Image (cartoon, helix red, strand yellow):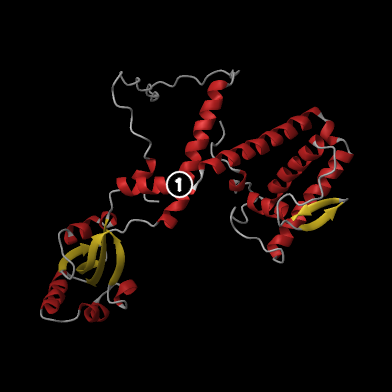
Amino acid sequence: MRGIVRPSAARTDRGTAAAALLAGVALALTTAACSPEPVAQRPPQPGDAAVARINGEVVWASDVKREAVAEGLIGPGDPLDQTSDLFRQVLDEVIDTKVLAAEAVKRKLDKDPAAQRRLAAARDRALEDLLVDNVVGQALSPEAEAALYQEFLRNQTPAEEIHLRQIVLASQAEAEQVKKLIAEGSAFDALAMERSRDDATRFKGGDLGTTTTDTLPEALATAVKGAKAGQVVGPVRLDQGWAVLKVDARGPEPAPTFESARPQIIRFLTYDRVKDLVLKLRSQAKIATLIAPPPDVPGAPTEPASAPPPASGAPAPAANTAMTKATP
């Protein structure tokens, strides 16, 4: 089974422009071979605009945008200005594809049995994408997205954020001296600018920014464990010397907003729905693999057996909560 989640709008890895052009030729040949009647001259979608005509066949703005998305030049939801250089570039590629496909048909290259297999494969991929787009469109709804977001919020374990400053000195004795000056009332920011050996932070008052405690190096995490906002700790041995640290602030990491979480929510809903569809269709199809199974490798791990079904009256397994283990 090829990758499960493959909406046509998500095909961003076709490789070089030449590969994309050849793929377009194959699809154009499929259209020509399967649709002997001329392509309809009315817009394929409301508001579409005709941008070229090739031997009487209209090229629509949506055709150009679809090709730009397929090549990974823009995202599925991104606009593509018809006056832009990118639009003209992709339009030229669409025109090239269509004139090459027409010439291939003229030379009857599409009649060769091997060519017919390639055309059939291109048609299958296009139909697969259409089905996936249809299924994904049904799976994605404001209600489903909101429900999954709320599930994530209920199950997440928020990390702790911490905002640190540092002054890095050459020796432990110097670090102890600086810590004593701070205790006597000297400003941490000023001492950082005057004495810190870390050029990346000294001119920012030693500011290390905000991070989460679970991503701190072990030495720093140990030093600030239990320290309250405003507290100075150290000295701490670092690779570049000895550091005196100040905890500017700390507290629970804010939950991600719905908008920041939405891309992962969409990926999860898409994968979940399409995976279920693929498994259902494979179980209903008569599939016979005509190649030999892979040879057994001594010592190779074996796939675990499926869990037995729950006994009558036993609670059902919990719902899939894959999103609860990752921050969107």
Q: Whole-percent x and y of residue 125?
A: 66, 36
| Residue 326 appears in the picture as rendered | no
Answer with the quarter of the image where residue 251 lies: bottom left
| Residue 323 appears in the picture as rendered | yes
Give 136 or 250, whichever is nearer the viewer.
Answer: 136
Looking at the image, residue 172 sits to the left or right of residue 9; the answer is: left
Looking at the image, residue 14 sits to the left or right of residue 218; the answer is: right
Give 123 or 99, whichever is nearer the viewer.
Answer: 123
Is residue 52 positioned above or below 144 on the image?
below
Type of amino acid under label 1: Glu
| The N terminus lies in quadrant | top right
Which residue is painted at 38% across and 40% down in the image?
322
Total marks shown come to: 1
Is residue 311 positioned above or below 29 on the image?
above
The residue under label 1 is 143
Q: Whole-percent x and y of residue 253?
A: 29, 58
Give 311 or 267, whichever is nearer the viewer.
Answer: 311
Instruction: Describe the element under mark 1 as helix, strand or loop.
Output: helix
Answer with the quarter of the image where residue 112 lies: top right
Q: Whole-percent x and y of residue 271?
A: 49, 39
Which residue is painted at 31% across and 59% down in the image?
254
Q: Whole-percent x and y of residue 182?
A: 14, 77
Which residue is painted at 62% across and 44% down in the image?
8
Which residue is painted at 87% across and 51% down in the image?
56
Neighbourhood count class around disc 1 (C-alpha, 10 Å): few under 14, some 14–19, many 20 upward: few
